[in-house]
Each structure stands twice: as C-alpha cells, then as structure tokens.
Image (cartoon, rainbow, N blue to C red):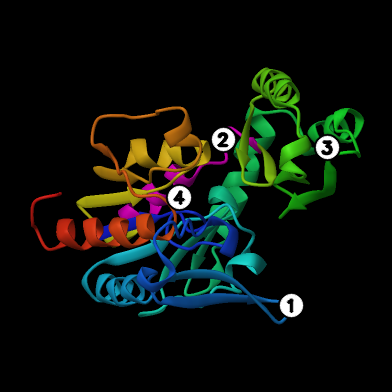
C-alpha cells in the first residue's frame, strides 16, 4: 500500500528570505534553491539537499502539498521532483487532482461552512471595524472561504489578537498568527478532512505529516506520524500530541530535517 505524505509548505518545507534562520557562519550556510518567484523576484527557498530529498520522496510516496495558500499562490511554487497528483489548497477548501479543483469536494466544503459557522461577510466586517490602519497593511479574502490581514508585526497588539480569537471562537472560526499575517478561518475548513479524502482515494495505510502553525494542528492529529519544526506557533505554544515529534531545528534547516524524517519513515527505518 502507498504511504501518503501530507506537508504544509510555508515555514515547514519552503522559506522566505526572512524565515531562513541562517544562524551559522556565512561560509557554512547551505546552498539554497529558489522554488518560487513572484513579480519577478525570488520569494521562497529550500536547501539544495532538501530539493533532492523531496525528489526522492516524490518517487517513493504519495506526496501531497497541504497549504493555506490559494490555488493561484500555490501554483507559483515550482517544487523539485514529480508533479504531485494531489494538492490541498485554501486550508482544505480546494482539493486539486492533477492541478484541477475537484468540484464535488469544493461543493461539500461550502455546504459544511454554510451549516456550521458564521458567514465570511460577518467576519470581514468585524475585521474592518476593529483592525487599526496604523498596523494593518492589507485586508485580504482567500478563495471566498476565509480572511486574513497583512500586518506590521512589531506594531500588532497581542491583546487584539486574543480578543479576535475569543470573538471568532463563538462564531465557529479560528484565528492564527503566522509571520506578518493574521488568519481568520472557519473551523470546518480543515487540512485534515482533505487529507483523509486523499488517503481514501489512494488506499494509503500509513500517513505522515508536518506543519508549524495552529492551522496545522488538525493535520498532525489526523496522520499516523507527524513532525513540527522548532519555530512557529506550535513550537511557541509547546503544542504536542501522541505520534508528533517536536524537532529542534529552526528555519530552512528544519525543512531539510523534516524531509529526512519523511523518507526514513517511508523506507521503514527508525525515526531519529
């Protein structure tokens, strides 16, 4: 039976220049491979070694990129290795099969959102009313499914984020702070539901996963074996669960380590 590997992308496998965490001496820094260009500028990287590991993983398992990115944002990424047959975008709102949205899956997601949580318009209105233009750079809506703000992180009041989280909780939504973005996402919109569907379709009996943010917690709980890096929301809150390994590596080195752990598990070796 195939092994399914579902991994978050940003700050888990791929990293912006600001998130690389190259703390070693310059002469010992790893060679980097650019995997995303946006508006003619390089945007996301992994190490060259990680690129080879990802290629090997794509040959050995069903690799499923599992991201909160929109489809358009995901399609900017050019990962090494075989093109994934499945990808999960918009935090589970879109299941791509050979690069094309599965319409039945998306329709089912919309039905669950309508039944189980407050509408997006209510959340957007609350964000517009309470977020201070002093620290908000952009208001964004992703795929008509969830909302996020691009903020000046050093000016963002922690108390506002906590208050937003409490307000959203009562309406069936969750809040996540990732770098310079504050996400408001409906609770029924999950990566884990889409991963379970891919596992069903592929007949995978072993599922592996990795992620760094609170939006990845449900993914890590759903897989048989998971990893989180030494940075991100999950690390900051010391979140853990049975079957989840907290790695010490931070930044792009963590992405390389996660891919090594995936490959070791796919090949049946002991986890480090």
- Cα–Cα span, label 3 and label 1: 27 Å
Residue 188's tag is 2
Magenta-span inclusion, residue 188: yes
Q: Which of marks 4 and 3 is in front?
A: 3
Residue 157's tag is none
Q: Do the numbered discs 1 and 2 sit on residues whose CB atoms are within 8 Å?
A: no
- Under circle 2, the secondary element is loop
Residue 58, quarter of the rendered image: bottom left
Residue 134, quarter of the rendered image: top right
Classify 11 as above or below 221. Answer: below
- Cα–Cα span, label 3 and label 2: 17 Å
- Residues packed near mark 1 inside 10 Å, few (<14), some (14 to 19) or many (20 plus): few
Q: Earlier in the sequence, mark 3 or mark 1?
A: 1
- Relative depth, front residue between 105 and 189: 189
Q: Name the residue under label 3.
A: 124
Percent of width and height locating residue 113? 65, 37
Q: Which of marks 3 and 2 is nearer the N terminus?
A: 3
Q: Which of marks 4 and 1 is nearer the N terminus?
A: 1
- Cα–Cα span, label 2 and label 4: 11 Å
- Under circle 1, the secondary element is loop
Q: Mark 1 points at which residue?
A: 39
- Cα–Cα span, label 4 and label 3: 25 Å
Rendered-image quadrant of the N terminus: bottom left
- Residues packed near mark 4 inside 10 Å, few (<14), some (14 to 19) or many (20 plus): many
């Amino acid at each position: 039976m195939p092994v399914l590997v579902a991994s978050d992308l940003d700050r888990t496998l791929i990293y912006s220049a600001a998130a690389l965490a190259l703390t070693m001496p310059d002469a010992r820094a790893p060679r980097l491979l650019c995997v995303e260009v946006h508006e003619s500028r390089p945007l996301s990287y992994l190490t060259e070694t990680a690129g080879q590991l990802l290629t090997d993983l794509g040959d050995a398992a069903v690799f499923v990129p599992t991201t909160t990115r929109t489809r358009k944002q995901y399609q900017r990424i050019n990962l090494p290795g075989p093109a994934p047959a499945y990808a999960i975008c918009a935090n589970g709102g879109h299941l791509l099969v050979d690069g094309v949205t599965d319409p039945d899956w998306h329709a089912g997601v919309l039905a669950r959102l309508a039944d189980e949580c407050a509408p997006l318009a209510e959340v957007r209105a609350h964000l517009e009313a309470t977020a201070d233009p002093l620290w908000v750079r952009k208001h964004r809506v992703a795929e008509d499914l969830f909302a996020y703000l691009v903020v000046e992180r050093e000016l963002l009041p922690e108390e506002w984020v906590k208050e937003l989280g409490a307000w959203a909780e009562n309406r069936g939504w969750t809040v996540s702070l990732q770098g310079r973005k504050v996400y408001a996402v409906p609770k029924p919109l999950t990566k884990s539901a889409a991963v379970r569907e891919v596992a069903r379709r592929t007949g995978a009996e072993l599922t592996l996963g990795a992620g760094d943010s609170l939006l990845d917690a449900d993914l890590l709980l759903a897989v048989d074996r998971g990893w989180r890096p030494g940075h991100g929301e999950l690390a900051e809150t010391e979140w853990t669960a049975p079957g989840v390994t907290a790695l010490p590596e931070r930044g792009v080195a963590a992405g390389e380590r996660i891919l090594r752990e995936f490959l070791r598990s796919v090949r049946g070796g002991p986890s480090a």
